[in-house]
Image: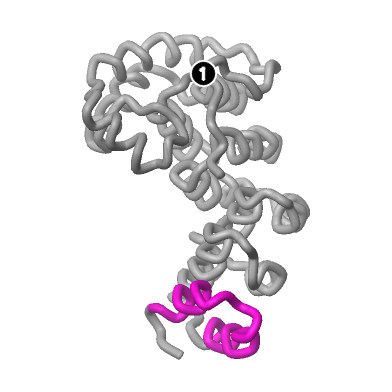
């Protein structure tokens, strides 16, 4: 079941750090986005995303252009700015504001420490759907873990979580690592969640294997051959899609 969002921002942490940059962003952002809203497209987007949140109906090119406009002339953010922008955007009801936060974190994750991970964990578990979870996992969580390998302990905890989205994030956080992939964790995580009851987890198992197959197809074939009876058919199909059995 999709977790519906609260338009009052219920569940968003109260301890948002002060940030002059975030004040400016959150002053500019709603005005810029509201002026470009498309109600017909918004209704279509909301239906496609299973009513996870209301939408403004902004296309990706429009959002990219407005992103640059909103941030024009602003300095490079620090970690407090990133935290404040992300949490305050998550308080706004329309999904495009969450996309802005995800894009902002993706572009600035290298300026942040491992202390950002609890904030990202909140974003992964509040108003959750694949459209934000996947980008946060691969680009933000992945970046934080790559910079601080001590965070692998958190990934080890996430893969055992009862909720599907932290499990999916743990599986996908190495999606862009290629030769830097911790194969012990990659294959270990897939082996620990081989027949998960949730579609999004089964899909993620196959997806992370398929992506690593671009680096080491023989290792992926061997893993699938050794675990075929335990892996979900969907995971097997995804893992072998580009390399064959």
Residue at 43% across, 16% down: 25
Q: Which residue is mark 1?
A: 7
Query: Does 41 appear above or below 168?
Result: above
Residue at 53% across, 41% down: 2
Residue 122 left/right relative to 66 = right
Which quarter of the figure is the N terminus placed in?
A: top right
Range of residues picked out in magenta: 219-241
Image quarter for residue 47?
A: top left
Tell me, yes or no, whether the highlighted magenta stretch contains residue 77. no
Residue 70 left/right relative to 180 = left
Q: In x, y percent, where is residue 112? A: 60, 35
Query: Does 133 appear above or below 19?
Result: below
Q: Is residue 207 visible?
A: yes
Q: Nearer the viewer, residue 68 or 137?
A: 137
Query: Does 207 appear above or below 5?
Result: below
Image quarter for residue 79?
A: top right
Residue at 43% across, 75% down: 214
Q: Is residue 111 visible?
A: no
Q: In x, y percent, where is residue 85? A: 52, 22
Residue 173 left/right relative to 21 = right
Q: In x, y percent, where is residue 62? A: 23, 30
Residue at 35% across, 17% down: 73
């Amino acid at each position: 079941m999709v977790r519906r969002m609260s338009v009052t921002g219920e569940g968003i942490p109260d301890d948002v750090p002060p940030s002059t940059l975030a004040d400016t962003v959150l002053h500019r952002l709603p005005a810029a986005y509201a002026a470009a809203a498309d109600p017909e497209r918004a209704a279509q987007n909301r239906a496609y995303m299973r009513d996870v949140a209301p939408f403004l109906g902004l296309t990706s090119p429009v959002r990219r252009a407005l992103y640059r406009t909103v941030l024009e002339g602003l300095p490079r953010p620090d970690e407090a700015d990133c935290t404040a922008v992300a949490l305050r955007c998550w308080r706004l009801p329309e999904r495009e504001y969450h996309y802005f936060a995800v894009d902002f974190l993706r572009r600035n994750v290298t300026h942040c420490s491992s202390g950002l991970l609890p904030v990202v964990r909140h974003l992964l578990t509040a108003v959750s759907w694949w459209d934000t979870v996947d980008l946060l996992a691969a680009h933000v969580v992945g970046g934080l873990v790559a910079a601080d390998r001590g965070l692998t302990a958190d990934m080890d905890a996430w893969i055992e979580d009862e909720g599907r989205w932290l499990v999916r994030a743990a599986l996908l956080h190495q999606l862009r690592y290629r030769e830097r992939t911790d194969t012990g964790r990659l294959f270990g995580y897939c082996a620990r969640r081989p027949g998960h009851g949730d579609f999004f987890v089964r899909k993620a198992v196959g997806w992370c294997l398929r992506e690593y197959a671009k680096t080491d197809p023989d290792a992926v074939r061997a893993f699938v051959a050794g675990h075929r009876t335990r892996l979900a058919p969907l995971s097997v199909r995804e893992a072998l899609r580009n390399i064959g059995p």
